[in-house]
Structures are given as structure tokens and as C-alpha cells.
């Protein structure tokens, strides 16, 4: 039973580490925000053209 608990917490730590390492830094966030703004701008332009 103790082995399962240790394995569980090791896997949880691995998942948390992967999430923290997956682009949560400010530069990646800024790039993501810029990409989203460009997408929304393009989408809004397409919607205006179709209306």
C-alpha cells in the first residue's frame, strides 16, 4: 500500500513538473496572447466581410 502511495505522489510530481515546464514563462505567455489576438482579429475581419 505504501508503494502505491509513493508511486502516486511521484507521478503527481511528474505531471506538475511537466505543466510548469510547458510554457508558463512570461515570454511564452506573451507569444500565446499575440497569436490569440491575431486569430481574433482575422476572425472578426472575416465575419465583417461575410455580413
Image (cartoon, rainbow, N blue to C red):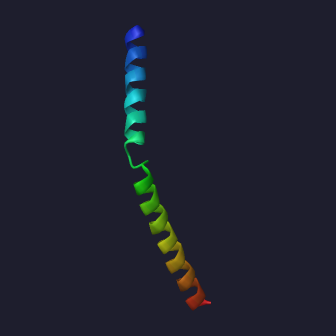
Q: Which residue is drawn at the image coordinates 51% and 70% (left, top)? A: 37
> Residue 4: x and y, percent?
40, 15
Front one among 26 and 14: 26
**37 left or right of 22?**
right
**47 left or right of 25?**
right
Q: Which residue is drawn at the image coordinates 37% and 39% (left, top)? A: 18
Q: How many numbered discs sit on the rendered protein?
A: 0
> Residue 42: x and y, percent?
50, 79
> Residue 19: x and y, percent?
42, 41
Q: Which residue lies furthest to the front in this view?
A: 26
Q: Which residue is drawn at the image coordinates 43% and 28% (left, top)? A: 12
Q: Which residue lies furthest to the top in this view?
A: 2
- Identify whether 9 is placed above or below 1: below
- Identify whether 36 is placed above or below 49: above
Picture quarter with the C terminus: bottom right
Front one among 25 and 47: 25
> Residue 16: x and y, percent?
43, 34
Front one among 25 and 7: 25
**12 left or right of 43?**
left
Picture quarter with the N terminus: top left
Front one among 49 and 25: 25
Q: Which residue is drawn at the image coordinates 46% and 60% (left, top)? A: 30
- Identify whether 49 is placed above or below 37: below
Amino acid at each position: 500500500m505504501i508503494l502505491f502511495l509513493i508511486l502516486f505522489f511521484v507521478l503527481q510530481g511528474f505531471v506538475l513538473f511537466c505543466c510548469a515546464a510547458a510554457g508558463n514563462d512570461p515570454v511564452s505567455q506573451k507569444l500565446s496572447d499575440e497569436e490569440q489576438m491575431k486569430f481574433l482579429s482575422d476572425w472578426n475581419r472575416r465575419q465583417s466581410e461575410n455580413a
